[in-house]
Amino acid sequence: MFKELHQQKSHFLLCNVWDAASALIAEKLGYQALGTSSAAIAASLGKPDGQNIPFETLLTVAKQISEVTTLPLSVDIEAGYADTPQEIVDNIAKLAKLGVVGINIEDSQLINDCRTLVDMHDFSEKLSQVKVQLNDSNIEMFINVRSDTYIVDAATALPETIERIRRYESAGADGIFLPCLTAADDISKIVANCSLPLNVMCMPELASFDQLQQLGVKRISMGNFVYDNMLAHLENTLLSIKQQGSFKPMSLV
């Protein structure tokens, strides 16, 4: 079912969540599927994004979400929380046991708070080995590869992005996620050169959902923007309560 959502006629809007409560709200509002936001989960625990929480903590959050909803769940495992393909597969297997049906895995790493792209050949080889081992273990998992070309250097990203997508598709990727991609012309060229379903993320300059659908985008996600918006609202509410000396800033009904 989750894979089919990427081929439906209308756009597939993935609701990014960070805990059981946000998952329940998403299901109540009729979203088709859920995806964890690594940045939102980390922030909710007082940590920066970038594998700064133990994998077991991520596993616990995924378990809590899967226990309260029947919606398909994809989990952002960042760089895999491991170095070797076997270790990554072991982590994916733990998620699969919880009923998780998809993952995001990225082709970059944070070095001294600076995001750097991993060599595309090395990443493709690792991805291929992960896919083979998952198939050998009869583990079905939608692998959405996040390529950070537009995060690292949007001005020169297009040709490298297309080359990386071709390599990742050959290695067994099921989808491609390009955060910070917003330019309509680039989106059109990527769709024309790629048979994988394209996933874009909430950005201030991003086109409307209808326009994205016309451009060929298959999946739209929220990243940590909804969580950040909620936190900003919380901060404003708490500030108003303190300044006004009452609970009138809150709706108690």
Image (cartoon, rainbow, N blue to C red):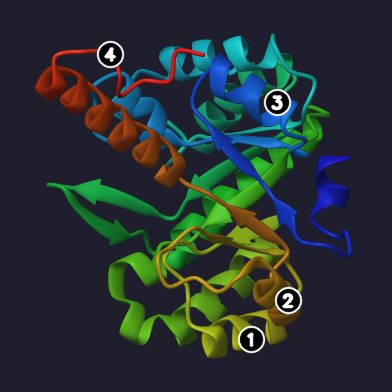
Going from N to C along the chain, the mark reached first, 1 or 3, is 3
Image position, residue 39 (x, y; %): 37, 37
Is residue 172 among what the camera can see? Answer: no
Mark 4 against mark 3, which lies toward the viewer? Answer: 4
Does residue 244 sit above or below 170 in this rendering?
above
- The residue where tag 2 is placed is 216
Tag 2: residue type?
Gly
Mark 4 against mark 1, which lies toward the viewer? Answer: 4
Q: Residues within 10 Å of mark 2 (few under 14, many from 20)?
A: some
Disc 4 to disc 2: CB gap under 8 Å: no
- The residue where tag 4 is placed is 247
Q: Residue at x 42, y 13 (%)?
A: 57
Mark 3 against mark 2, which lies toward the viewer? Answer: 2
Q: Residue at x 73, y 76 (%)?
A: 216
Mark 4 against mark 2, which lies toward the viewer? Answer: 4
Residue 239 got which mark? none
- The residue where tag 1 is placed is 188
Q: Residue at x 20, y 19 (%)?
A: 241
Going from N to C along the chain, the mark reached first, 4 or 1, is 1
Q: Quadrant of residue 208?
A: bottom right
Q: CA distance from mark 4 to mark 1?
A: 50 Å
Query: Which of the pair 185/211 is nearer the observer?
Result: 211
Q: Residues within 10 Å of mark 1 (few under 14, many from 20)?
A: some
Q: CA distance from mark 1 to mark 2?
A: 7 Å
Query: Which of the pair 48/78 is nearer the observer?
Result: 48
Query: Which of the pair 108/250 is nearer the observer?
Result: 250
Image position, residue 232 (x, y; %): 29, 37
Query: What is the quadrant of the N terminus in the image?
Result: top right
Q: Residues within 10 Å of mark 3 (few under 14, many from 20)?
A: many
Q: Residue at x 24, y 26 (%)?
A: 47
Tag 3: residue type?
Val
Does residue 180 sit above or below 75 in this rendering?
below
